[in-house]
């Protein structure tokens, strides 16, 4: 499980991406590769779930460890949308201790606490 916090929703999703990578490696990942990312969901929790799933697909298909994310998040007609780019490097270039297989719904949370955006997510290793 990880918990991330930030002042803005976009920063929160970026911190969540870094937290996901940190579960797998303690290395500092270099920005060498860039991939587009986009997802839509009915709630912020489901948007985070979809976003984390997209990052895991990038790890599985492209071998990407994420170093940073630049996103735009918006809401319209009851749906949340995220679009942006993910930066990172080839995971095999770094020492790591296992892979994250998937996000889970267990204790999944996105909301505001004490003026900060907070995300909590449990992942399957």
Image: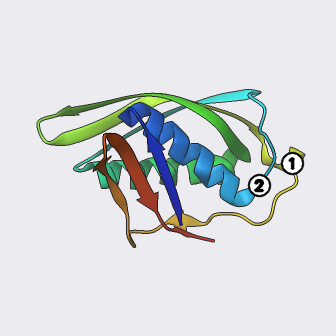
Local secondary structure at mark 2: loop
Q: Position of residue 76 (x, y in %)?
A: 16, 32
Q: CA distance from mark 1 to mark 2?
A: 8 Å
Q: Position of residue 103 (x, y in %)?
A: 49, 63
Could you say which is closer to the camera, residue 46 or residue 10?
A: 10
Question: Which residue lies at the image location 41% right of the left edge and 52% below the top edge?
Answer: 119
Q: Residues within 10 Å of mark 2 (few under 14, many from 20)?
A: some
Could you say which is closer to the camera, residue 80 or residue 25?
A: 25
Residue 19, placed above or below residue 13: below
- Toward the left, the furthest residue is 77
List the residue tagged with mark 2: 25
Q: Position of residue 17 (x, y in %)?
A: 56, 45
Ranked by sequence position, the earlier of labels 1 and 2 is 2
Mark number displayed over residue 78: none
- Toward the front, the furthest residue is 114
Question: Which residue lies at the image location 54% right of the left edge and 65% below the top edge?
Answer: 102
Seen in the image, is 44 located left or right of residue 125? left
Q: Position of residue 74 (x, y in %)?
A: 27, 30
Instruction: Name the colouring of the figure.
Output: rainbow
State the image quarter where residue 32 is shown.
top right
Q: Residues within 10 Å of mark 1 (few under 14, many from 20)?
A: some
Seen in the image, is 99 located left or right of residue 10? right
Q: What is the quadrant of the C terminus in the image?
A: bottom right
Could you say which is closer to the camera, residue 9 or residue 57?
A: 9
Mark number displayed over residue 94: 1
Seen in the image, is 67 located left or right of residue 95? left
């Amino acid at each position: 499980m990880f918990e991330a916090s930030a002042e803005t929703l976009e920063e929160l999703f970026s911190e969540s991406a870094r937290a996901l990578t940190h579960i797998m490696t303690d290395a500092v990942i270099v920005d060498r590769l860039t991939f587009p990312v986009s997802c839509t969901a009915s709630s912020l929790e489901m948007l985070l779930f979809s976003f984390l799933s997209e990052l895991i697909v990038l790890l599985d298909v492209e071998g990407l460890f994420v170093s940073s994310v630049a996103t735009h998040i918006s809401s319209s007609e009851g749906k949340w949308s995220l679009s942006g780019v993910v930066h990172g490097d080839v995971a095999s270039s770094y020492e790591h201790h296992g892979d994250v297989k998937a996000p889970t719904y267990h204790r999944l949370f996105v909301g505001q606490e004490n003026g900060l955006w907070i995300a909590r997510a449990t992942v399957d290793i």
